[in-house]
């Protein structure tokens, strides 16, 4: 593997891993290891909403979503922390390390990486990002590791008395905020659909920021696509960043997105 000690923030590619990574036939982990060995500095942010819902259901706990995000009460927050910060995070890290890569699993709470506050009391302990401290990410990258980040974050700002110290912040949101903080070259969102589609169902291969905002305003981008588009718009506040939303179920989707910009929907500054 190439020496990463000179990694600069702008050299980094941030990747948001969707649920497709749990398919044993998926090639994402293979791509991560291959890219790491080629000296491409990656930061991985993962979700796992379906697995959290499954565990909540197994515990006879209902779960509700609003605009693609989980309404998070105390019970849901504890499950999110256990499943995403524990099981999912460590399975990804283990798969990379066993496959010959080098990865370290952390959450948004570690090193004060993602510091947030409650966004809307009606959503429970769902947070919005106030500050990103990327020093822990850069330390890991410079030591030759790929950070794997769970979207459990630090309840650092405006915390009510006796409120939890942790917050559930959408993984897409965190990926966009990290991408913006590092002024990265690329933000890649691996999901379970081909990309963004228009009202007629046709894939939109390229979008400007204005076109992406219009899709949000008109409701064409809905459900889980809402935080993804918002994440891209946040990331491209830095004009060097290119954002790609692509079907992570396709063979070597990550490697192709990093090396060729092909597939899915690309959103880039004008």
Image (cartoon, rainbow, N blue to C red):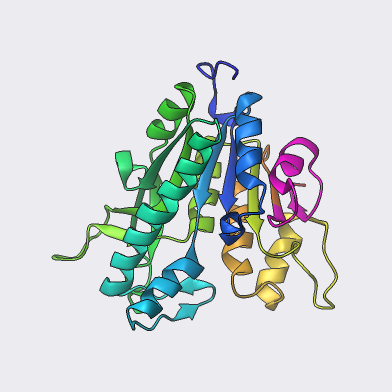
Give, as a single range, the part of the protein colored magenta: 245-269
Looking at the image, residue 137 lies above or below residue 48: above
Percent coordinates x, y for residue 135 in the rendering: 39, 31
State the residue at coordinates (72%, 40%): 255
In front of the other: 80 or 127: 80
124 horizontally vs 170: left or right? left
189 horizontally vs 265: left or right? left
Q: Does residue 237 appear anywhere in the picture?
A: no
Q: How many marks?
A: 0
214 horizontally vs 32: left or right? right
State the residue at coordinates (66%, 54%): 25
State the residue at coordinates (28%, 66%): 78
In front of the other: 198 or 56: 56
Percent coordinates x, y for residue 264 in the rendering: 77, 56
Which image quadrant is residue 190 in? bottom right
Percent coordinates x, y for residue 215 in the rendering: 71, 70
Looking at the image, residue 166 lies above or below residue 147: below
Which image quadrant is residue 41 in? top right
């Amino acid at each position: 593997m190439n020496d990463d000690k000179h990694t600069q923030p702008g050299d980094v590619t941030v990747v948001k891993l969707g649920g497709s990574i749990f398919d044993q036939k998926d090639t994402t982990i293979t791509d991560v290891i291959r890219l790491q060995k080629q000296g491409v500095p990656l930061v991985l942010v993962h979700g796992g909403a379906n697995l959290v819902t499954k565990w909540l259901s197994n515990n006879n706990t209902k779960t509700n979503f609003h605009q693609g995000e989980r309404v998070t009460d105390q019970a849901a927050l504890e499950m999110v922390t256990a499943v995403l910060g524990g099981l999912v995070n460590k399975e990804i890290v283990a798969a990379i390390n066993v496959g010959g890569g080098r990865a370290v699993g952390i959450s948004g709470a570690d090193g004060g990486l993602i510091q947030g506050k409650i966004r809307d009391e009606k959503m429970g302990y769902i947070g919005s990002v106030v500050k990103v401290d990327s020093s822990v990410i850069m330390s890991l990258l410079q030591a030759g590791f790929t950070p794997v980040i769970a979207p459990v974050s630090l309840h650092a700002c405006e915390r009510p008395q006796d409120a939890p110290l942790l917050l559930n912040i959408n993984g897409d949101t965190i990926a966009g905020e990290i991408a913006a903080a590092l002024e990265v070259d690329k933000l890649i969102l691996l999901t379970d659909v081909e990309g963004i589609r228009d009202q007629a169902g046709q894939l939109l291969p390229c979008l400007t920021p204005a076109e992406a905002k219009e899709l949000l305003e008109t409701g064409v981008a809905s459900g889980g696509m809402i935080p993804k588009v918002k994440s891209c718009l946040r990331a491209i506040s830095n004009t060097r960043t290119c954002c790609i939303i692509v079907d992570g179920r396709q063979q070597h989707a990550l490697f192709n997105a990093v090396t060729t910009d092909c597939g899915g929907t690309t959103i880039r500054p004008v």
